[in-house]
Amino acid sequence: MDALAAYLHFFSILLLAGMLVAQFALCSRDLQPPHVQTLARLDMLYLVAAVLVLGTGLGRLFVAPKGASFYFMNPVFYIKIALFLAVGLVSVMPTLQFIRWNRALKAGEGRVLRDPDIQTVRRYIALELLLLACIPLAAVFMARGIGLQH
């Protein structure tokens, strides 16, 4: 059962990363109005993946053979959680921009996809990817007992 829980956790993390990479690739200077709806869909899938990551992570925390005390005793665990929360907080800005773009396009507004806005969103997504890439490093440190007092 632990192996299945670990697999589901890793799968949801890969799904989350995939949604971010897809957003990053699509949100470029070539962004066209029809792609804005795709960005919004990817963002919704990203939210679903984040909930799966959280749910499977909590499942592993409380059901895994190591026990919750293994995680709670390790300061690296809190770094990992802080990184996950930071990714979530940084994701708010792109989500709000996708919503603004969709509303403006549906309202028939003219040129709503301005290069500075696109580049700003792209930088936020890049920051999310960078922070997300640090989480597995923290997980590796935790698995090896780094951070525990001996």
Image (cartoon, grey):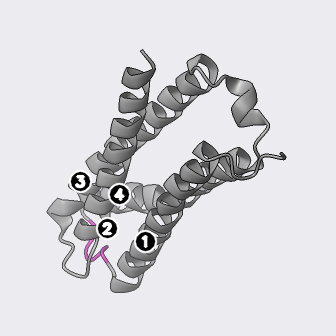
Secondary structure at numbered mark 4: helix
Q: Is residue 73 above or below residue 55?
A: below
Q: Is residue 125 left or right of residue 112?
A: right
Looking at the image, tell me whether mark 2 or mark 1 is earlier in sequence order. Answer: 2
Question: What residue did someone put label 3 on?
Answer: 37
Q: Quadrant of the C terminus?
A: top right
Above or below residue 9? Residue 148 is: below
Please provide percent x and percent y for residue 1: 42, 14
Would you say residue 16 sits in the magenta stretch? no
Foreground mark, 1 or 3? Answer: 1
Give the residue drawn at x 30%, y 75%: 113
Residue bearing the label numbered 2:
24
3D distance between C-alphas at marks 1 and 3: 20 Å
Would you say the residues marked 2 and 1 are in contact, meaning their CB atoms lie under 8 Å apart? yes
Quarter residue 35 falls in: bottom left
Lower sequence index among marks 4 and 3: 4
Q: Secondary structure at mark 3?
A: helix
Give the distance between the C-alpha atoms of the residues marked 2 and 3, in whole angstroms: 14 Å
User: 34 and 21: which one is in front?
Assistant: 21
Q: Residue at x 51, y 27 (%)?
A: 55
Looking at this view, name the residue that lies furthest to the front. Answer: 150
Q: Quadrant of residue 34?
A: bottom left
Q: Which residue is mark 1?
A: 126
Magenta stretch bounds:
109-113
Residue 61, horizontal then vertical, whole percent: 61, 27
Name the residue carrying label 4.
Answer: 20
Q: CA distance from mark 1 to mark 4?
A: 9 Å
Quarter occupied by residue 109: bottom left
